[in-house]
Image: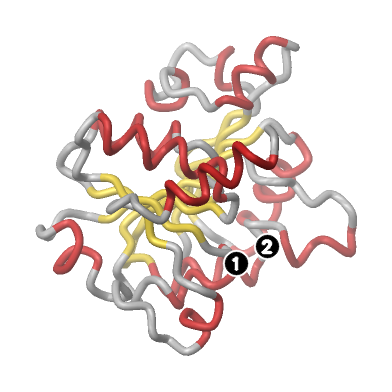
Amino acid sequence: MGSKNKLKRFKENETFSNLFQPSREILLNDAFELKGKWNKDYFKNDRPIVVELGCGKGEYSLGLARWYPEKNFVGIDIKGARIWRGAKTALEKQMDNVAFLRMQIELLDKAFAPGEISEIWITFPDPQIKYKRTKHRLTNPDFLALYKKLLVPGGLIHLKTDSEFLHGYTLGLLQGAGHEILYAHHDIYKNTEAPRELVEIQTFYEKQYLEIGKPITYIKFKLK
């Protein structure tokens, strides 16, 4: 995408009523106005909040929001040109149960209060394979502790990835720590019993992976 096109999208992002772009400074100063008030001040209801981390163009947040009107969804990504697509589509389709948040995932507790989130979807994150990148891996122990703080008791986490490495790493970590694995499969498209939200909603990158025959893995779990 050309820089002209990107700039146009960044400018348009500023006009979207369903896209929030708090500065790092605002987040670090705990001054983000929707923290603890997503339902009261934005969604105007008390439905469960489902968050998608690394939402990209928002395909999953939008797909789930269509299927589950009884829940609220927030797609999170740092890439403004990508998140533009999800926010624009939601506005065009007048979907009032989905919002988007442009921020870094490690600051999640600056945007949500403890117990404010009911479910977390982690869709096709960078597996951060190199050892020195472990701290950026979205299922490492520090991130799991962060999610636990923000989830309601018994809240669900979903990991969908094309990375067999990340799938194996996460499974090992969860088993070692005694967390509750509710469902795990190393190739969901070869599993006839896969839940429909796993195979009927596909991201832009997922379609590319499937075209080259890459298996898509999935884990659903609860933190102890």
In the image, is 213 to the left or to the right of 192?
right
Q: Name the amino acid type tagged 1.
A: Phe
Quarter of the image for residue 67 reads top left
Closer to us: 192 or 78? 78
Vertical placement of residue 179 versus 125, above or below = below
**Identity of the residue drawn at 65% across and 45% down:** 125
Residue drawn 51% across the image and 74% down it:
23
Residue contact at pointers 2 and 1, CB within 8 angstroms: yes
Picture coordinates of residue 89 (x, y %)?
35, 32
The type of residue carrying mark 2 is Asn
State the image coordinates of residue 130 (x, y, percent, origin top left): 89, 54
Question: Position of 120 compared to 41: left or right?
Answer: right
Q: What is the residue that sits farthest to the front in this orientation?
A: 4
Indicate left or right for 219 with 70 as reference.
right
Q: Find residue 143 and name its label.
A: 1
Element type where label 2 sits in the image? loop
Q: Is residue 158 above or below residue 20?
A: above
Say which residue label 2 marks: 140
